[in-house]
Image: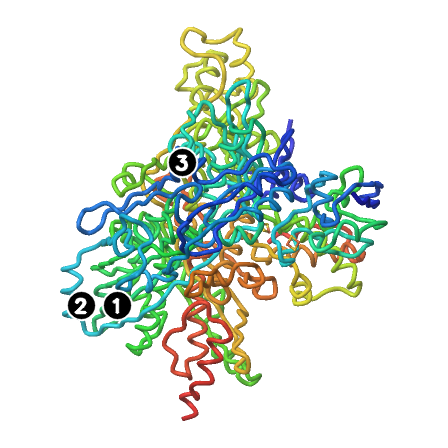
Amino acid sequence: MNVVVPFEGIGASVRRKEDPRFLSGRGQYTDDIVRPNQAYACILRSPHAHAAIRGIDTAAAKAMPGVLAVFTGADMAGIGGLPCGWQIHSKDGSPMAEPKHPVLAEGKVRHVGDPVAVVVAETRAQARDAAEAIVVDYEVLPAAATMEAALAPGAPAIHEGAPGNICYDWHLGDKAATDAAFAAAHKVVSFETSNNRLVPNAMEPRAAIGDYDTATGEYTLWTTSQNPHVIRLLMGAFVLQIPEAKLRVIAPDVGGGFGSKIFHYAEEAIVTWAAGRLGRPVKWTADRTESFMSDAHGRDHVTKAELALDKDGKFLALRVSTLANMGAYLSTFAPSVPTYLYATLLAGCYTTPAIYAEVKAVFTNTVPVDAYRGAGRPEATFLLERLVDIAAAEMGMDRIEIRRRNFIPPDAFPYQTPVALQYDSGNYHATLDAALQAADWAGFEARRAEAARRGRLRGIGCSTYIEACGIAPSAVVGSLGARAGLYEVGTIRVHPTGSVTVLTGAHSHGQGHETTFAQLVADQLGVPLAQVEVVHGDTARVPFGMGTYGSRSLAVGGSAMVKAMDKIIAKGKRIAAHLMEASVEDVEFDRGTFRVAGTDKTKSLAEIALAAYVPHNYPIEELEPGLEETAFYDPKNFTYPGGCHIAEVEIDPETGQVQVVNFTAVDDVGRVINPMIVEGQVQGGVAQGVGQALLEQAVYDAEGQLLSGSMMDYCLPRAEDLPPVGVATHTTLCTHNPLGVKGCGEVGAIGSPPAVINAVVDALRDYGVRHIEMPATPQRIWSIIHAKRPAAAE
Amino acid sequence: MPQVTLTVNGKSHTVEVEGRTLLVELLREKLRLTGTHVGCDTSQCGACVVHVNGESVKSCTLLALQADGAQVTTIEGLAKPDGTLHPMQEAFREYHALQCGFCTPGMVMAAIDLVQKHPQGLSEREIREGLEGNLCRCTGYHNIVKAIAAAAEVMHGRRSEIARAAE
Ligand code: FES
Ligand code: FES
């Protein structure tokens, strides 16, 4: 039988399996789920950035129609705080300040949006009405809304036990070697920059439903999470003390995460606990205003960076000093972001031999800050790629040439950086060359001149970046302070008739795992895509998992699946050897068929599966029946995607408006499983990077009020703000995972912001501009243009 | 409680609502048509777009009572009864114009209205401008724009099917 099967394996742009349900309105997001007899929670949040709670009067609220209960911090006093998953030690060896993060405020509120009380009522509207009837007696305290204010002498103390509002004062690298290199340098280039604070804004607002089964004593939490097993662990063990066996966490369809749905949030604990107290399911859904003041924000660094160069433009040393905003409490992975996900990336793709970084993490009266797409790596890349451009300008060198001169050469891998990481593979010249060609860098001056004739200022900029993802080797991150392992788990269940269920600990919230992971199975086991079902997001179905973040799903989760499939094949060979009366060593497997080498004796995977489940003729003495295998895969190293992004912009000098007119990304993400999905991931990441560069910023006033607290005030990129994004890949394989994959989820958001700002600075070169802060808003640019006449005109 | 009578996806419903109930709440909570999403509270995101009497409308911005007597189409009502997808749905899949899928129902409904209002065709710029009321945080819009352009060709009879050229 010769059926032509369309190629569905590794490398095919297979259309996504999940799309039909999303396109027809049959997705099941958390807020779409209604449990029988469900009640609704509304959370009363602090309107003040910093205040003592003198009293809470809930009597009127409790008497409102439909109200089932009103809870305050006093009701939840016996419950643990929200735990932090990563402990950093300061330079002097002392552990970071780790103040309690109560689920509901205990005596004090520390940011606008801090949860103070919760109303549970029959309907959403009734819960909201009653929340408005709660009277809280606040004694407003002076607030520290910025890091500068929090570090000033006499600043308000946000927590007891965090003197000076410092969480930690950490460093990495060889200070003496760095100082020595600076002392001997031909040239030192320095600049200061802030990395703008962002609000992730996944389109689906967070939501949670708690349920309690009075018959079994089992709790179930549906939540908008990127990692349900991690939530079960954190909430069960640390907050509510519910044993894992009695707690099921389901993250159903999730409408985007970008990091913001990694963390364990108060509302998850509140609805679960309230469901137990009331014996009814309790649902909470954020409105967007709540999302702005309760989802963890991202970035928010202030940095001074200095680069030492020799006379040929070779980088000798880099010195970086950063203040990182933690917000009012430590979110789940916050401490790791400006340390091990940031300073370790400061070598970039360059051979800089000495690097020293200091990072001070600061508490402020703002929403907690944690990982947002890229997490630490965009901040490192931005300062490095800006610094390289500034250095080129000040050395009178070409921007491309200075990069080439400092690239880690393709034959130098594995390459040990001075900031802890060992890069396994890459070819930075190749991605740069491909991008220069695709963007027609050489032809740019003609386009600049043409734009000038139209009265527009045109500029071009590039960034050559590297990132570390696929986190991470458990022993390594454990030694760096992680309180979890970072392996991943995959189960391959071959059913009796040969269809396959994959159970993965990774979670898909837009990444298309149901398709990509099925392609791995199609490729390795030869099972048609239509017969592969990928299950994720349910602790009762998936054995265990660490979830999806840090572009780890394929590199770590996919590798676990490969290992599990290896075990399936190994067992299948033994069954096949028995059935075909051959020795195991003689049985080969290739895409669905077991064959006795050199013969035409074959058995299909489906036949083997049937024999495994109906073991009438089976080596039952030495082999268990069934065909299901689970593997835990612990990565050997991070993976290191890299590449080159080129942005071309036009500025209208009348308005200061920047339009990105061309964007080219050439990324090395390792082996590509589904090119269509990879392109989509890069385009989406670039959109968020352009948003950071030009549009987005979370702004607090001096009192700690969030001024950009709605989609009317916080500028998210819309279709007309963005150009078409050209995406290409150039592959060097990851050397230490079985698929050779590196990860593609974050590269867009990491590589693009400096490319855009480098282009904006280039467009304004006649105005003597050295650096522009993000977001490069029309106002910022207009002010520059109108403050200075073009150098050329003087 | 006041009553509202309206036709949703061809089916007539009479529902009791509070005066403050929004059309989107009626659709999601009373009729359990949860394909229409809520992404914001300031009428910015377009996740809630449905068609009311043939025009795209943000259903979070209309009181249920204002829809009395209206013909409403939601994402659930787009495909043919035999399951054949609307060309816009087809194009979104073919061009990978969705990732998490949360903005998708509103995006598809808005895009259909946009195409219908431009029988002469749409440039890339016009599509981008026409999506002003819809946010997508996942895709960067690149593939959404391509999908809409392809669907427009089919909807206006200039092409017979949505098939993405091999690239
Ligand atoms: S829900 Fe955002 S515009 Fe309607
Ligand atoms: S696909 Fe996720 S918001 Fe558009």
Q: On the picture, is B146 further left or further right than A667? A: right
Q: Position of residue B80 (x, y in %)?
A: 79, 42
Residue beneath the point at 20% across and 46% down = A94
Sequence-earlier tag: 1 or 3: 3
Residue type, numbered disc 1: Glu
Q: Position of residue A621 (x, y in %)?
A: 42, 6
Residue closest to the far bottom? A794
Tell if the residue under mark 2 belongs to the same chain as the one under mark 1. Answer: yes
Chain that bears disc 2: A
Q: Secondary structure under badge 1?
A: strand
Residue A664 seen = no
Residue A448 seen = yes
| Distance in Å between CA atoms under marks 2 and 3 | 54 Å
- Callout 2–callout 1 Cβ contact below 8 Å: yes
Q: Residues within 10 Å of mark 2 (few under 14, many from 20)?
A: many
Task: Identify the disc placed on residue A182.
Answer: 2
Q: Residues within 10 Å of mark 1 (few under 14, many from 20)?
A: many
Residues A778 and B142: in front is: A778
Task: Identify the disc placed on residue A80.
Answer: none
Judging by the rendered image, the residue that carries numbered circle 1 is: A306
Q: Could you tell me how many numbered marks the image carries?
A: 3
Residues A221 and A4: in front is: A221
Judging by the rendered image, the residue that carries numbered circle 3 is: A77
Quadrant housing the N terminus of chain A: top right
Residue type, numbered disc 3: Ala
Q: Which callout, 2 or 3, points to the residue nearer the camera? A: 3
